[in-house]
Image (cartoon, helix red, strand yellow):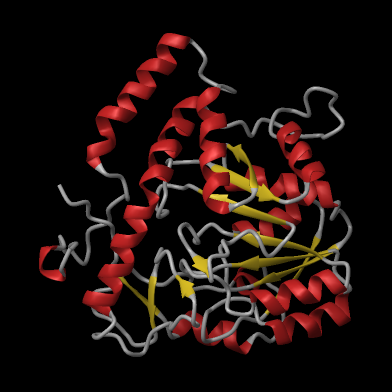
Amino acid sequence: MPLSELKIPSPNQFSIGFDPRDKTRLLGMWEAILTAQRWSEGPFTARFEELWSAWNGLASVATASWTGAALAALEYIGVRDETVLCPSNTFMATPLSILKAGGRVEFVDCNREDLCLSFEDLVRKAECHRPKAVWLVHIGGHVAFQANEIADYCRKNGIWLLEDCAHAHGAEWNGRKPGSWGDAGIWSFYATKTISTGEGGMLVSRHEPLLAFARSYRNYGKPDYQAQGLNYRMSEFTAALGTVQTERMPEIVDWKRRYAQEALDAQHPNRVRMPAGMHSGYYKYIVFDPLQQSTGKVYDQPCHQILGHRVDLPNTDWVAKNHWCVPIYYQPHV
């Protein structure tokens, strides 16, 4: 469809990426759940996991939130009293997950080009702190530009690598999906995300023991209570919405990519530019020039400042002050 036929979003109007054409089908799913009297741990949760695995290429475990999936991974690794390296340019959920799992947070600088974890600073911090694990956060919808170097380094040095994929729905790099570089990928389906269920999360991994632990952890450690988890189960109503949204994801992400290429790129030459073979899901359209009409910044206060860590992270401080986000909300063709 040509640009002239795209429905252009209002610069200041937030829009959840839900297509109203899916409403009737979704309501039918919810009616089936009500009729079956099975509101949790049912077939829609299993279907959502199957669809996410089919797209992501890894086995998946649905949870009630990003937090539930993150804590399951950190508890499995065993980070209590251990150091975990974390970018400061991220949402507070990332370092707080480490603290809640009993670990110590040490912050790492980001790159100015992609706003993601700096491989060079990671190596410096890893040699100093000897971490048990590293958080790699994909910012804004694209894959971190140094994901390959970071993954290789962690693998060679026996460091667990966790990917925070909360922004990365629909992204890929030469066909490879976020979550596949590390030992586990953690997804969020919060209300603002490209693929949203209101609340919800997903853990993906190639490690079957970690997946089994996560399944138990989300359900109080059942059946043998070896995993000291709590209630992080996803409801069937949420999973039905996730099923519909995942099936619609190719169209949502394609719309965002075409809108970025055809309506925004020419206006914003000073923007995040993707490496060859990389496709962003465009959770955010990030530029490095001030905007009058902006959705704000991805993050305007680094986590190390919020938590009072005295550490020199010049790129992180620069990014917080020098980037803005152009509105880019999916508008279905109705």
Taking the spot 57% from the left edge, 30% from the top edge, the residue there is 46
**Of all residues shown, which one is farthest toward the left?**
4
Q: Position of residue 322 (x, y in %)?
A: 43, 86
Q: Position of residue 144 (x, y in %)?
A: 58, 74
Taking the spot 42% from the left edge, 81% from the top edge, the residue there is 323
Occupied quadrant, residue 96: bottom right
Taking the spot 70% from the left edge, 28% from the top edge, the residue there is 219
Quadrant of the image for the N terminus?
bottom left
Give above or below for 196 relative to 94.
above
Give above or below for 113 relative to 297.
below
Q: In the visual, does 199 lie left or right of 6?
A: right
Using the image as rendered, state which of residue 6 and residue 110 is in the foreground. 6
Q: In the visual, does 202 lie left or right of 3?
A: right
Q: Position of residue 108 (x, y in %)?
A: 70, 78
Q: In the visual, does 42 lie left or right of 185?
A: left
Give above or below for 321 relative to 132.
below
Occupied quadrant, residue 23: top left
Taking the spot 23% from the left edge, 40% from the top edge, the residue there is 20
Number of numbered discs: 0
Q: Position of residue 7 (x, y in %)?
A: 15, 60
Occupied quadrant, residue 3: bottom left
Using the image as rendered, state which of residue 244 and residue 67 is in the foreground. 244
Q: In the visual, does 97 lie left or right of 1?
A: right
